[in-house]
């Protein structure tokens, strides 16, 4: 029988942060070994109104040939209930004991110094649990389960749940899977559910029960899991998140969501016109999959819907001269029409769109045009700029045009110009199977309109500006709208939301507050800036470049650390990676930039060598050998993502103002369009390989470290050695710096006018007196 010796300590630390790390680490007592690999990390959260019970199930892997003794470390989030903490190891429940603060602080500092994990620095504080685990079999697994309760923060109808797990280094990824499941049970109807950190799947059983889930193999554990959900008894709920740094205009996000349990008479009918390209180039798999997707859409029409089908090649043919009701007989007639379609002839795009927009409309019924093509116009009007203008003129009744481009011959600027000018969106697919999936998924989202032609008005002292998207989309059942913008002044306000429900106009009023100061939700600043840059780049590529637009994109890219076609992180082999007043940045004002060249002396992507290291085994770092921790460098994936993003956006400047030609066609055009749409609709902060936006402050990679914008060249600096006595003294005196210092072992940051704090991995002062620290920080 295996003998398990346990000693659980609840460590209360001297430094108090906003939260404590919830990433469980299993650390061998043999100090030559690093943390054990996390095979899987699974989290189940049960939320009942404000109470949350969190269950964590972790499996660790011992990849050594020896039986190990280890220490399990699990810091709990601030506000967790210690009385309901429980730990199981191999099914055996274990109790805990409390360690005095001074002893706890010494033990924690020793753990952090040994692991050399700056990601843990941010969470020094709160409660930390420590368990002794023995024996862990050679080449075997160790399972650990933990459960704790916490009370959610709540303000103005918005609940906030945080599972903090930010770490770095060898414990920063799972070997198999990371899974989070949050089950929400609310007495007040649930409206919006939103995560700015992870792409969650949302399933709603009814107005009072919902589940949000995330799952990923070989997942990065370098960021916290943050979940918001809002509650409201209204048919359409509106909730507000704000962020406002000192002495600046504020940022806001409005979340607008219809109630889940709607009666049939609360869902509007819609008028859908399907316009399908049947030119010769659509033959084969493309036509087969397009017809299958169209059949799916026809079979899911609502009983109150109107519809028509128009096919075009060298000419056009409509199912009916006027929209048909979605009766069973008419749907079957349409399916037969679709089944008989053949791919022959040219591409009369202009004539097809004119016919779609010339149909009679019924008052109060939103008209959606679903337009699918795989090519450029070859019959009739072929001037793309003229077609774009004509479509706007023909669309007097404000139909929404949704475009699906298929294959390599479509021009993304041309199709996006049509959809953007007519309140729609564009999707692109390489082949028929991808088209079928995207078209079916799109139709499922717009199947049930709730409110059309939305208008927002704010009655109060706060002034709202720079809101994205610029024009508010329609509201559909099962969806939620996220509006991001800025505000001046502060105070209570009434937000009035109006829109059409059938032939009637309906309004809702919501009481909100725009605060003078709000330190939480700093991710809103980056999301807002990303959306604005996406909008500005769209203006450039569809209407042409101007100095004003280019300068604004560069300014936003610099301030918020956003990849753009004009701001990159390029160096040459004979130049240092420092541009005056801007570390790591190089502005490009003319000429496109392609993939990173390999010839000596040519520009190279900063940090591109890190990508090759992702496939090579790494040691444990700091003299460790490996006990099984993952070998992939944490920065490799963000660096690769930054490069792919820059490469996609470089097509913007090459194709600016061009709606025909090769520059915006094929894979380049598709990637550019998808990247820009992702920016315009950004709802999660991207993790960059070369920039980090932390606590409202921008840091740029410089070598292996991070330098805050404006910190280079400071007149007064204090250089401190990482993990020294002075390092922990700084954290104790200024816990607000923990999130910034968690970036790494080499960090330079501003601490006042003309003063910078410099943390170095292997140099710097190891002791600093309290008086000197007080004088340097101006306390």
Image (cartoon, rainbow, N blue to C red):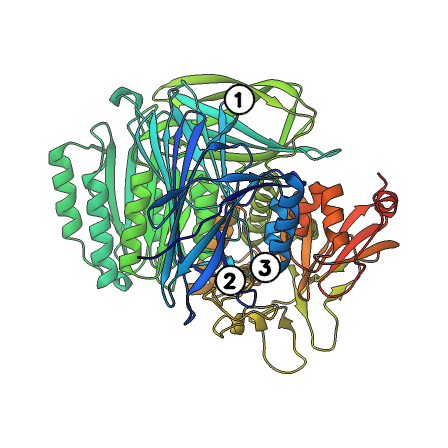
Mark 2 or mark 3, which has the lower sequence index?
Answer: 3
**Residue 765 found in image quarter:** bottom right
Judge from the rendering whether residue 1 lies leftward or rightward of residue 515; answer left or right.
Answer: left
Spatial CA span between label 3 and label 1: 41 Å
**Residue 514 found in image quarter:** top right
Residue on which the image places disc 2: 637
Residue 17 horizontal/vertical position (percent) = 63, 39
Residue 722, compared with residue 606, is above or below; it is above
Residue on which the image places disc 3: 115
Residue closest to the eye, 193 or 355: 193
Mark 2 or mark 1, which has the lower sequence index?
Answer: 1
Q: Nearer the viewer, mark 2 or mark 3?
A: 3
Q: Secondary structure at mark 3?
A: helix
Residue 276 horizontal/vertical position (percent) = 28, 50
Determine which of the numbered discs, if any, sits on residue 156 in the image: 1
Residue 309 horizontal/vertical position (percent) = 24, 43
Residue 246, compared with residue 587, is above or below; it is above
Q: Secondary structure at mark 1?
A: loop
Residue closest to the eye, 604 or 66: 66
Instruction: Give the residue drawn at x 53%, y 53%.
Output: 222
């Amino acid at each position: 029988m295996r003998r398990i010796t346990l000693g659980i300590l609840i460590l209360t630390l001297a430094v108090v942060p906003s939260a404590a790390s919830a990433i469980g680490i299993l650390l061998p007592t043999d100090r030559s070994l690093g943390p054990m690999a996390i095979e899987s990390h699974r989290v189940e959260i049960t939320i009942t109104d404000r109470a949350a019970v969190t269950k964590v199930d972790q499996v660790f892997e011992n990849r050594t040939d020896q039986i190990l003794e280890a220490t399990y470390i699990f810091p709990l989030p601030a506000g967790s209930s210690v009385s309901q903490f429980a730990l199981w190891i191999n099914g055996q429940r274990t109790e805990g004991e409390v360690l005095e603060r001074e002893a706890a602080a010494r033990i924690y500092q020793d753990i952090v110094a040994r692991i050399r994990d700056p990601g843990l620095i941010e969470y020094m504080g709160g409660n930390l649990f420590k368990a002794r685990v023995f024996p862990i079999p050679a080449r075997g697994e160790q399972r650990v389960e933990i459960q704790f309760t916490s009370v959610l923060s709540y303000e103005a109808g918005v609940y906030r749940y945080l599972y903090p797990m930010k770490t770095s280094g060898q414990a920063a990824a799972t070997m198999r899977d990371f899974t989070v499941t949050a089950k929400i049970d609310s007495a007040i109807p649930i409206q919006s559910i939103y995560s700015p950190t992870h792409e969650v799947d949302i399933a709603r059983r009814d107005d009072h029960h919902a589940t949000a889930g995330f799952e990923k193999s070989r997942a990065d554990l370098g960021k916290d899991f943050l979940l918001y959900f809002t509650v409201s008894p209204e048919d359409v709920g509106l909730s507000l998140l704000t962020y406002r740094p000192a002495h600046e205009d504020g940022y806001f996000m409005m979340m607008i969501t219809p109630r889940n349990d709607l009666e049939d008479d609360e869902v509007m009918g819609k008028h859908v016109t399907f316009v399908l390209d049947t030119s010769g180039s659509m033959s084969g798999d493309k036509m087969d999959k397009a017809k299958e997707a169209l059949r799916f859409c026809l079979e899911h029409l609502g009983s109150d819907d109107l519809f028509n089908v128009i096919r075009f090649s060298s000419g056009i043919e409509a199912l009916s001269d006027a929209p048909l009701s979605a009766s069973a007989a008419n749907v079957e007639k349409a399916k037969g029409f679709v089944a008989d379609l053949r791919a022959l002839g040219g591409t009369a795009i202009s004539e097809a769109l004119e016919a779609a927009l010339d149909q009679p409309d019924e008052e109060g019924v939103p008209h959606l045009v679903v337009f699918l093509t795989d090519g450029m116009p070859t019959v009739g009007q072929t001037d793309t700029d003229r077609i774009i203008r004509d479509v706007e003129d023909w669309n007097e009744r404000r139909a929404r045009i949704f475009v699906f481009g298929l294959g390599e011959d479509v021009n993304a600027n041309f199709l996006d110009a049509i959809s953007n000018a007519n309140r729609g969106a564009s999707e692109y697919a390489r082949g028929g199977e991808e088209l079928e999936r995207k078209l079916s998924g799109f139709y499922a989202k717009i199947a049930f309109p709730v409110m059309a032609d939305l208008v927002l008005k704010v009655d109060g002292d706060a002034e709202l500006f720079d809101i994205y998207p610029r024009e508010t989309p329609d509201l559909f059942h099962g969806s939620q709208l996220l509006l991001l913008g800025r505000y001046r002044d502060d105070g209570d306000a009434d937000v009035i939301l109006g829109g059409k429900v059938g032939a009637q106009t309906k309004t809702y009023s919501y009481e909100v507050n725009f605060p003078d100061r709000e330190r939480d939700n700093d991710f809103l600043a980056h999301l807002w800036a990303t959306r604005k840059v996406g909008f500005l780049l769209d203006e450039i590529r569809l209407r042409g470049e101007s100095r004003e637009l280019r300068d604004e994109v560069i300014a936003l890219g610099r301030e918020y650390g956003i990849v753009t076609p004009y701001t990159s992180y390029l160096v040459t082999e004979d130049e240092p990676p420092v541009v005056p007043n801007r570390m790591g940045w190089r502005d490009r004002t003319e000429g496109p930039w392609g993939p990173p060249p390999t010839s000596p002396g040519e520009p190279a992507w900063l940090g591109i060598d890190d990508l090759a290291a992702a496939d090579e085994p790494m040691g444990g770092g700091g003299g460790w050998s490996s006990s099984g921790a993952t070998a992939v460098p944490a920065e490799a994936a963000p660096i690769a993502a930054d490069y792919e993003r820059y490469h996609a956006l470089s097509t913007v400047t090459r194709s600016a103002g061009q709606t025909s030609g090769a520059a915006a066609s094929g894979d380049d055009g598709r990637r550019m369009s998808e990247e820009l749409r992702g920016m315009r609709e950004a709802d999660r902060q991207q993790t960059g390989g070369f920039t980090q936006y932390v606590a409202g402050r921008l840091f740029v990679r410089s070598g292996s470290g991070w330098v805050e914008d404006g910190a280079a060249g400071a007149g007064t600096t204090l250089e401190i050695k990482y993990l020294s006595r002075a390092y922990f003294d700084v954290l104790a005196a200024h816990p607000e710096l923990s999130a910034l210092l968690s970036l790494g072992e080499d960090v330079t940051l501003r601490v006042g006018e003309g003063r910078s704090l410099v943390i170095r991995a292997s140099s710097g002062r190891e002791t600093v007196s309290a008086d000197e620290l007080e004088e340097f920080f101006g306390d």
